[in-house]
Amino acid sequence: MFDFLSKGKMGLRLDKMVFSQGETITGSISMQLKKPAKARGVFVVLFADQTKTRLTTKGIGRYTARVFEFKLPLDGEKEYGAQPYEYKFELKAPQQGQQVKMEGVAGALVDVATLFTVGQGSPPQWCVEAKLDIAGGFDLGKKTKINIG
């Protein structure tokens, strides 16, 4: 619909979609820009969002919280040309009971064990996202849902 806004194409391929705790997630990212662009880098992000319920003065409300995030840089800040790019990556799925420091929240620790327990909200929705962080513009990205159990 808004293809004229697109800066290019990004593909995300994973070797499989279902993973055990602690298992290695492997895949690749392909990218081709329509024209050169200055970017902060290419990243792959493993994250989990969880829908939770809370009681407010206006009643029961639902909200989505990012309960896990790990960002892996694959390429640095530079001018990316219009030629095709290919990146391979490996991420490790978290294990139950593992302590993880979430990016962007200074000093905040999340106990990943709570991600796998019932009664803490909905089960977490796990995703792998490939992203070209374009300086001063819309990022180019691709996201895929996965299962970690």
Image: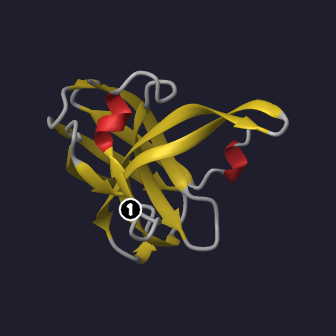
The spot of residue 19 in percent (x, y) is: 22, 27
Residue 49 image point, x, y percent:
49, 38
* Image quadrant in which you'd find residue 74: bottom left
Q: In this view, does 123 lie to the left or right of 74?
A: right
- Residue farthest toward the bottom in the current orientation of the protein: 78
In the image, is 59 to the left or to the right of 77? right
> Percent from the top left, x then y, of residue 77?
40, 77
What is the image's colouring?
secondary structure
Q: Which residue is drawn at 26% across and 24% down?
A: 149
Q: Looking at the picture, which amino acid does disc 1 mark?
A: Val
Q: Residue furthest right?
A: 58
Front position in the image: 125 or 76? 125
Question: Relative to the observer, which residue lies in front, 100 or 87?
Answer: 100
Where is residue 120 drawn, in percent x and y?
47, 30
**Secondary structure beneath label 1:** strand
What residue would you read off at disc 1? 42
Q: Tell me if residue 139 comes above or below residue 136 in the rendering.
A: above
